[in-house]
């Protein structure tokens, strides 16, 4: 499929931006071809520089649970813009967003707003170390928690997409503070505590993994993490940057009934603008400056525009809980389009078609997939006006703006691929 304007734009972009993109997975390196340059979005659709449009199942990598330019968010932004863009001072609006997050996620007794998921996880790790006085952190192969130095170890998302095992530029001393074990293996976590016991500050996990493709937790896995960390005096951190407010109003922790010590958030809570957050037990959060000795700061943290968009999103979701049932039903329709020999994992409106016989319960199994066949799947969809994540190791996202007809057409195009 030729996209002359986008092809010219990516060539131009590469002269001033590494790879022509501001985030690696956007470069289409794993699937080939020039990425469409997007001009605008509306509802479930995005429109590119060559006049084509697509049903969008990337949804800005998760934030756009209500699709592009939902009226409530646009209105909130217009109102906020009339007052100013940034003050570097407290505002009532950021208190309202913090209160909304705490109300929806009871484990979050206090929360600090930042500007990205990476800032959230980086800060949560520092806080866990400061609170426990311990240095080591357990993470899971294939999970991705943003580009935090010490967490770029056996990470998923763009690192899996590009086949980067361990990131250059991360000092060995930093990487050595991370113990990476297989996802869904409580035994491996138990062993890590046998080996390093009172040196482990925290276990950080995507409660439903999305960055090796979608991999839900095995039965009892999250409960085991909760029990093991509590028994060893370590903190349990749920990285809900992707799952928070997407899988349920209370996130994965509501779905699975687990109360983590800390939670990190992003994506949906910004309504498409840059917001991240970390929060949890008040006794832990009380260690954060200016209350305590764990320092974290940010020029644009709690930015009035971003916070207004996020607050409008959360207020809408609180008033319309039926959205989650709709999202689940739409995504189930897509899952039903997969034939034998393809493994579909999904949780709520997160879904991945793995090109292997399966099951896919961890990173090692995800890596057995036929990524060339995934690339063919990706382009089959793109050429037919469906914009899917450009990597086997990413989750696709359905929005509330995708109509029954949109989803039915997408399922039909997927079926055609497998029948071809
Ligand atoms: P950001 O710094 O990109 O806002 O959030 C980092 C992050 C943290 N935790 C989880 C569970 C995440 O999924 C992410 C970011 N997700 C990727 C998509 N898999 C962002 C897309 C990109 O890197 O361009």
Image (tube, rainbow, N blue to C red):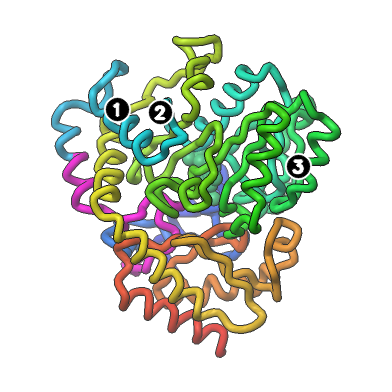
In which quarter of the view is residue 114 placed? Answer: top left
> Magenta stretch containing residue 142, yes or no?
no
The quarter of the displayed image where residue 413 is located:
bottom left
| Element on which disc 3 rests | helix
Mark 1 or mark 2, earlier in chain: 1
Taking the spot 53% from the left edge, 51% from the top edge, the residue there is 256
Residue ID for mark 2: 113
412 w.r.t. 2: above or below: below
Say if mark 1 contacts mark 2, CB within 8 Å: yes
Percent across and percent down for residue 403 are: 30, 71
* Mark carried by residue 189: 3
Rendering coords of residue 77 (x, y %): 21, 39
The mark that comes first in sequence, 1 or 3, is 1
Secondary structure, mark 1, is helix
Q: Which mark is residue 303?
A: none
The magenta segment is 50-77
Picture residue at 37% right of the left edge, 33% below the top: 102
106 in relation to 295, above or below: below
* Residue 178 percent coordinates (x, y): 74, 33
Q: Earlier in the sequence, mark 2 or mark 3?
A: 2
Whether residue 16 is visible, yes or no, is: no
Q: Out of 223 and 60, give the one closest to the viewer.
A: 223
């Amino acid at each position: 499929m030729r996209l002359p304007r986008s092809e010219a734009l990516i060539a131009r972009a590469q002269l001033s931006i590494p790879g022509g993109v501001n985030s690696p997975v956007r470069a289409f390196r794993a699937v080939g071809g020039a990425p469409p340059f997007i001009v605008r979005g509306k509802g479930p659709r995005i429109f590119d520089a060559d006049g084509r449009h697509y049903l969008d199942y990337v949804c800005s990598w998760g934030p756009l649970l209500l699709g592009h330019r939902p009226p409530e968010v646009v209105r909130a932004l217009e109102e906020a813009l009339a007052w100013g863009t940034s003050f570097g001072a407290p505002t009532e609006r950021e208190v309202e967003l913090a209160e909304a997050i705490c109300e929806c996620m009871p484990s979050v007794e206090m929360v600090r707003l930042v500007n990205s998921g990476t800032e959230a996880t980086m800060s949560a790790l520092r806080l866990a170390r400061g609170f426990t006085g311990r240095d080591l952190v357990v993470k899971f192969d294939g999970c991705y928690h943003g580009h935090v130095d010490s967490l770029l170890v056996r990470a998923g998302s763009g690192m899996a997409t590009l086949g980067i095992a361990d990131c250059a530029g991360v000092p060995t001393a930093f990487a050595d503070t991370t113990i990476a074990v297989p996802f869904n293996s409580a035994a491996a976590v138990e062993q890590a505590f046998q080996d390093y016991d009172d040196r482990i500050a925290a276990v950080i996990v995507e409660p439903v993994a999305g960055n090796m493709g979608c991999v839900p937790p095995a039965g009892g896995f999250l409960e085991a993490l909760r029990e093991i960390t509590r028994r060893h005096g370590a903190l349990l951190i749920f990285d809900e940057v992707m799952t928070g407010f997407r899988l349920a109003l209370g996130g994965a922790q509501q779905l699975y009934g687990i109360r983590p010590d800390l939670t990190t958030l992003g994506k949906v809570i910004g309504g498409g603008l840059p917001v991240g957050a970390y929060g949890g037990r008040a006794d832990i959060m009380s260690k954060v400056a200016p209350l305590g000795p764990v320092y974290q700061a940010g020029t644009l943290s709690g930015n009035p525009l971003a916070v207004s968009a996020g607050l409008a999103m959360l207020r809408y979701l609180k008033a319309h809980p039926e959205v989650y049932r709709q999202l689940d039903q739409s995504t189930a329709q897509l899952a039903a389009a997969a034939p034998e020999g393809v493994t579909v994992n999904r949780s709520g409106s997160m879904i991945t078609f793995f090109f292997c016989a399966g099951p896919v319960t961890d990173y090692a199994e995800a890596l057995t997939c036929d990524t060339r066949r995934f690339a063919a799947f990706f382009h089959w969809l793109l050429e037919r006006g469906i914009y899917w994540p450009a990597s086997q190791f990413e989750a696709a996202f359905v929005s509330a703006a995708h109509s029954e007809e949109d989803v039915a057409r997408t399922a039909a195009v997927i079926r055609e691929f497998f029948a071809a």
